[in-house]
Structures are given as C-alpha cells and as structure tokens.
Amino acid sequence: MKPLNILMIGAGMYVCGRGVDGYGTVVPAICEWKKKNQLNSIYIVGTASKNIKLSKLKVDELQCNMNIKLSVRYFPEGAQANPKCYKEAIHSIPKPACAIIAVPDNLHKEIAISAIQEGLHTLVVKPLAPTLEEVRALMEAQNKNKTYCAVEFHKRFDSANLMLRDVIRNKKIGNPLYFVVEYSQRKSLPTRQFKKWVHSTNIFQYLGIHYVDIVYFATGAVPKRAMAIGQKGYLLSKGIDTWDSIQGVIEWEIAQGQRFTSDILTNWIDPEKTSAMSDQKIKVIGTKGRFESDQKKRGITIVTDEEGIEEPNPYFCAPYGERGNVSYKGYGIDSIGQFLDDVVGIEEGRLKIKDLEGKRPTFKESVVPTAVLEAVNKSLKINGKWIAIRGI
Ligand SMILES: NC(=O)c1ccc[n+]([C@@H]2O[C@H](COP(=O)([O-])OP(=O)(O)OC[C@H]3O[C@@H](n4cnc5c(N)ncnc54)[C@H](O)[C@@H]3O)[C@@H](O)[C@H]2O)c1
C-alpha cells in the first residue's frame, strides 16, 4: 500500500497536549506508529489560527523529543477562525485514508459523518455520541459508505481490564453480583481545560462512560435500567453550571433472569495536588469470589521537593528515554496504533471490515455505552428516577 495520509480533526489536550504539560496521546501514537510503518502526511485541523499555532508548537517539540520528522499541514490555513475548515481538510491532496476525530462530544456525529461520507475509515474518541439517535445515524453512514469505524475506548487495551474480562468470562469468580467503580480527575479540567465546552458534557459522560464500556466488554451483558443523581456545589460557585460529581447505578442482565449491578461514582473536583491525573478503581463481587483492580496505584511512587508525591500510570501513555530518543508506550498508544494497523490491513485487502466486528470497539459496540449514558442523562434531569433501557 502507498504511505498513509491521516486526517486529524481536533488539536487539543488529547491530540497533542495543548494547554497542559506533555504532548497528549494521539500524535505520540502516530509518531510511534511511523517508526514501523509508511506514513506520508498528517492534516491537523482546529478552528482558530491562534490555537492551531499553539498545537503546532507542541507537535514540533514532540518531533524533536522523539527524533521523528512528520509532514504536517495545519488548518485553518489563514488568519481567520473557521469552525468548518475540517470540510476543506477532508478534501486534501493526497487524499487521507482515515480520520481520527477528537473534538467536543456534541460535534462527533456531524464531523464523523462528513469524514465517513468521503469514504474515510474513522476513529472517534469516546463517547461516540451522547444519544442513541446519533449512534444509529453514524452506523447508518458507516454501512452505506462501507468504511471501518471504531471508538477510541483505550481501556479495552489495558491488561488489567483484559484480565478482568477473562476472570469473568471463565467464571473464576462465579456469577457477577455487583461492580463498584470510582473514577475522578482534577478540578482544573472543568475549570480551565474544558471551560469552553464543559456545558455540553458532564462528568459521567466524560469519565463514567469508560467503565460502562469496560463492564460491557468484560461481561457482554445487556443493560436493563439505569438511574443517576449528582451534586452541584464547587463548580457552581465558580460560575460553571455542571455537576461536581455524578453517581450512576446500572442494572444489567447477563443471562436469562440473572442480573447484576454496577455503581459508577465519578467526579472532576479532585485536588490539584492529588498524586495522579486519574483516581480510578474497579472491583467486582461474584458468587465465588472477587476481583479488585486499583488502576490509580500502579505500584510507582515518586517523591520530590518540587512536585511532592506523584503516582504515575506507566501503562496508559508514558514517554521513555532522553530528549532526542523518546518513545511512548501504553494502552493509549496501542489503541491508536491498532486502528492504523487495521486501516492498512483493510486497504491492502488482508482484513475485512466485517471480521473486525466483535474484536474491536466498533461503532456497533457503542450502542450499549451510549444507551446507558442516555438513560443516566435522563435520570439526572428527573431526580434520579430509574430509566428503562429497551431495544438493545
Ligand atoms: N483529554 C483526554 O485525556 C481525553 C481522553 C480521551 C478522550 N477525550 C475526548 O477527546 C475529545 C476532545 O477532548 P480534548 O481533551 O482534546 O479537548 P480540548 O478542549 O483540549 O480540545 C478540543 C479540540 O477540538 C477542536 N474543535 C472544536 N470544534 C471544532 C471544529 N468544528 N472543527 C475542528 N476542531 C474543532 C478545538 O479546536 C480543540 O482543538 C472529547 O470528546 C473528549 O471526551 C479526551
């Protein structure tokens, strides 16, 4: 196959670390992929030229750190802000074979459909979309245009979650009775980093969705009903009208008449000085045992005068090596690399799109997480009433 051209829509924190320390996950993953594969150009699309310049600085620094040379074209190309310039970028020459979409959730559907309609294999960051109607429209576009479409649910690539899946599927702990998940991040996320689009999401949608997907991935169960309540306080006092914390309960059916629950507790008001970006734990109690996974404390503690106590996660997306020879490893890197490998396999005729169903986090696999998310969002509006989930 000819060297790959990649369209990258979105140029923020997750793509290249704009606005935070570090270089994000997507561009480091593309650089890693380039070490062993044929990459031609990347088109990186934002909305405002001022911001895209900041993204370019990040991408330039990353290339120096990794000693990788990328051929990048940035959009918008002029000085004017242009939220629709992704449409122009889609038609770039040479034509991109695939798109990676990392924009605010409420834009996923519109932008992904534009890419799919041009025949691009498309990876969308989680959540695919907040409503089932949008997920179905995306699946329809995919089927019509015969492209490969997946969701960047990188926790499916974490070996701790692969072990959880095996333990459940081989019945080592019997039948699951209940899962408990705690997942939270720092205050700066809603107050600084996502200030512009914080109103169009909430903390369950941003973090909770990951573990809804992991419970589904591990068990294959069908969600039957969900309820959620939340608290507003700290963020409201800062003029941001969104939940500090949301607690959702989902009831699932794993086999005829056999049900279990998952309690998913989320917040994004952790102290800035907490020792890790993500505080995350999952446990499941079954009829014959339990599985517990502390996904924050991965066994490393660094204590310094300058930074205090840090507990980094070496397994998600971490740089290794000195400047000029840095490489990135982790399940975030693997998840994006897998998509790019699949695109090449499909284009070379070695892989069939239909054969990836059931093996990858495809759009179809997102019906369940989005059905739960939609029910949680409805329940939040009506004081925690149970919402039935039907037709899955
Ligand atoms: N930050 C993370 O660790 C992380 C991890 C996984 C998934 N995600 C998901 O990635 C998405 C973006 O998150 P982020 O953290 O990068 O946010 P961000 O606010 O840092 O970046 C958002 C980006 O979207 C761009 N954008 C907005 N409207 C656009 C448009 N019309 N055309 C092109 N670009 C547009 C902005 O210019 C910006 O570059 C969200 O769906 C989020 O859930 C983020």
Image: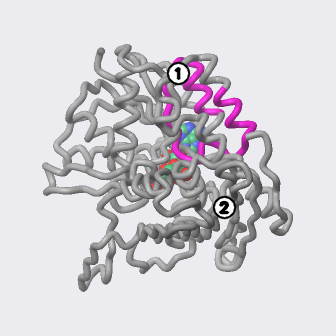
- Asked whether the viewer can see residue 89, the reply is no
Percent position of residue 124, x then y: 53, 39
Q: Residues within 10 Å of mark 2 (few under 14, many from 20)?
A: some
Position of residue 317 relative to residue 295, above or below, is above
- Disc 1, ligand 1: is the CB inside 8 Å? no
Q: Amino acid at mark 2?
A: Phe
Between 52 and 289, the one lying in front of the other is: 289
- Give the magenta part as a residue range: 110-139
Q: In which quadrant of the rendered image does the N terminus lie?
A: top left
Question: What residue do we see at 49% from left, 69% from top?
Answer: 290
Dot 1 amino acid type: Thr
Give the number of the disc on residue 56.
none
Which residue in the structure is indicated by mark 1?
Answer: 147
Residue 286 quadrant: bottom right
Give the crowd class for mark 1: few <14, some 14-19, many >=20 residues within 10 Å: many
The residue lying at 49 percent from left, 63 percent from top is 173
- The residue where tag 2 is placed is 260
Q: For the view shown, which residue lies furthest in the bottom direction?
A: 305
Taking 85 as reference, is 146 above or below it? above
Residue drawn at 71 percent across, 47 percent down: 371
Compared across the picture, whether 371 is left or right of 142 comes to right
Q: Is residue 195 magenta?
A: no
Foreground label between 2 and 1: 2
**Where is residue 56 drawn, in percent x and y?**
35, 44
- SS of the residue under disc 1: loop
